[in-house]
Amino acid sequence: MDYTSLNDETLLRLITRADENALGELYDRYSRLVYSVALNTLSDTLLAEEATQDVFERVWRKASTYSAEHGRVVTWLVSIARHRSIDLYRQQRSNKENILVDWEGAEAVDLPDGQNVEWEADLKQRQQRIRWAVGQLPIEQKQALGMAFFQGLSHPEIASALGEPLGTVKTRIRLAMQKLRNLLKDEIA
Amino acid sequence: MSEVQELHVIDRLPDYVLDILTDAEASQVAEHLAGCQACREEFLRLKQVADEIPLALVQTAPPARVKDALMGSIQAHKIKPIPASRSTSWQKLADILRLRLPALGVALIMVLALGNLLLWQQLKLSNSQTTSPMRVLALANTNNAPQALGTLVVGQSGDYGSLVVDHLQTLDNAHQYQVWLNRDGERISAGTFSVNHEGYASLELKAPIPLILYDTIGITVEPTGGSPGPTGIKVLGGDITR
């Protein structure tokens, strides 16, 4: 069976039947994304590796709990990765500095070459759009948004970490999300 | 800020979507969303944006050893995925009763649940070291549904649970009840359901991590098919950590 041609939902169904190749394929597709989420939350390669392995072990055990109402498979995966990483981040927090998310290079766009399978082309297209949109944000807004999204920090925590007034941080995050929404309005319903 | 923005919660929706509001603030936003179509639409747009944000990261491949460790762990420890059609004995019992004798069914389940709860408490009191039985949690109704009854039964492993409700209002075709699980401020949907003409329903809950790891459960009225986040009135809720 050519697993690379299967969509994500089919891979999950195969995983519920203990198909290790299906898990391997899902890992090959999304381990970079999961690892990057973990790395941007934890800023520690060993912890990010631990989180990545843990996320896919959970997928292996819990694939049957996925429901389309949770969103796309990749959204579900990233949600598990984000929360697992934030959990680990909070456990390690006393030993850590707050981390700046690595948005650098977000403007770089890999155009779909049109020869990929459907899932890959779709993912590349979405990456291209969101990277372009994030690239339009001022650095201060990207910084505050990254700390809220990836580290799960509250407004006061971000304000303290950045040494900025609370109101400024609130405004930056609000403006960042609203600008992304405006920039992506043609892609979202 | 315009008068319209002050009346709505549009300026707080970005923080609501990112889950960085306090519980009190989030409750205010959710309450407003329940009755405001315009804000609900904006919430859905922002939620879609938030779902895409991780894709903007510069991606780095994990070392090959991570995949080796993952596959090795699955094989070495013989970790098996949980079958999709797994059904607990409680669920089977609830299904049978629901199909045949709804009112008697829920009454019997409540009696069994109460018995189980008493047994659980006795075991706790005697400091027994034996394996814990299933957990049973009676949900609290709200002013929106003062007659509503709800019971959550969590399996012995803590991984799964079933919800049984009774005396909930029958909704029109455009609406369903939606179950929410909350953990550390993060909220997920655990399923939608409709009730029969007596206001009764049972549901096996779905969640990406064991149920026992969540803090609270809540049930709200949502458009049929469910919402990405709670927008309607809350009818039942409870603290899973108790």
Image (cartoon, rainbow, N blue to C red):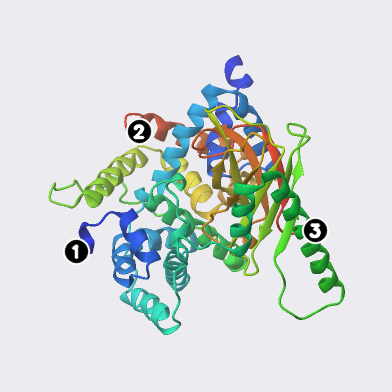
Q: Residue B155 in the image: x percent, y percent? A: 64, 65
Q: Is residue A174 left or right of residue A125?
A: right
Disc 1 marks a residue whose amino acid type is Asp
Q: Nearer the viewer, mark 1 or mark 3?
A: 3
The picture quadrant where one finds residue B242 is bottom right
Chain of the residue under the numbered disc 3 shown in the image: B
Q: Nearer the viewer, mark 2 or mark 3?
A: 3
For the residue pair B24 and A171, the one nearer the viewer reads as B24
How far apart are the two marked residues, 1 and 2, measured between alpha carbons? Answer: 34 Å
Q: Secondary structure at mark 2?
A: loop
Residue B195 visible, this angle: yes
Q: Residue at x 67, y 49 (%)?
A: B164
Position above or below: B184 against B226: below
For the residue pair A126 and B122, the one nearer the viewer reads as B122
Disc 3 marks a residue whose amino acid type is Leu
Whether labels 1 and 3 share one chain: no
Give the crowd class for mark 1: few <14, some 14-19, many >=20 residues within 10 Å.
few
How far apart are the two marked residues, 1 and 3, measured between alpha carbons? Answer: 52 Å
Q: Residue B213 in the image: x percent, y percent? A: 63, 61
- Residue picked out by circle 1: A2
- Residue picked out by circle 3: B114
User: Quick one: quadrant of the C terminus of chain A?
Assistant: top left
Q: Is residue A50 left or right of residue B233?
A: left
Give the crowd class for mark 3: few <14, some 14-19, many >=20 residues within 10 Å.
some
Residue contact between numbered discs 1 and 3, judged by CB atoms under 8 Å: no
Chain of the residue under the numbered disc 2 shown in the image: A
For the residue pair B87 and B40, the one nearer the viewer reads as B87
For the residue pair B54 and A169, the one nearer the viewer reads as B54
